[in-house]
Amino acid sequence: MKIQVKGDYIYVTMWDKLSKRPKRYYLGRKEELKKWEELFTIAREYKVSEDDVRDYLNYYLDKETNMTKVEYVLLSLSLGVEFWRLNGNTKTLSEKQ
């Protein structure tokens, strides 16, 4: 996964297994970069088992496109951030450094 800033927009480039080439997805405007950096940093810290990932994909995968539905990914990230904050981690990683 590679995050790119082109002009005023943020994109993420990931390998698309279906087309066997990289695919770029729009994330938002450049002003939202801090928010996305924090979300990706928190997501990297999660320790998730392979069974949990498999269950998640079975439930949230769009069978026609073989891709995870965007709404569910964003919802899970935002819920994860809230859960992280409710567990006493009130400061973001950038504030801790």
Image (cartoon, helix red, strand yellow):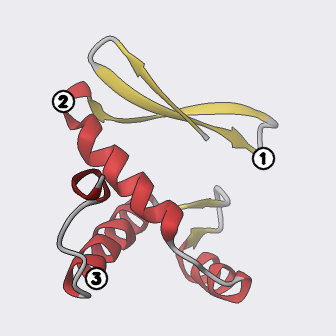
**Image depth: mark 1 or mark 3 in front:** 3
What residue lies at 25% left-to-right and 77% top-to-bottom? Answer: 89
| Position in image of residue 71 (x %, y %) | 36, 62
C-alpha distance separating marks 1 and 2? 30 Å
Say which amino acid is labelled 3. Phe
**Image depth: mark 1 or mark 2 in front:** 2
Given the current orientation, which residue lies at the most extreme top position?
A: 7
How many marks the image carries: the answer is: 3
Q: Secondary structure at mark 1?
A: loop
Q: Which mark is residue 17?
A: 1
Residue 32 sits above or below residue 46 on the image: above
Residue 1 sits above or below residue 76 on the image: above
Given the current orientation, which residue lies at the most extreme front position?
A: 97
Q: Which residue is mark 2?
A: 31
Say which amino acid is labelled 2. Glu
Residue 7 sits above or below residue 70 on the image: above
| 38 or 79, nearer to the observer | 38
In the figure, residue 21 lies in which quadrant?
top right
| Position in image of residue 31 (x %, y %) | 18, 30
Comes first in the chain, label 1 or label 3 = 1
What residue lies at 70% left-to-right and 31% top-to-bottom? Answer: 22
What residue lies at 71% left-to-right and 88% top-to-bottom? Answer: 51
Q: Secondary structure at mark 2?
A: helix
Q: Which residue is mark 3?
A: 83
Comes first in the chain, label 2 or label 3 = 2
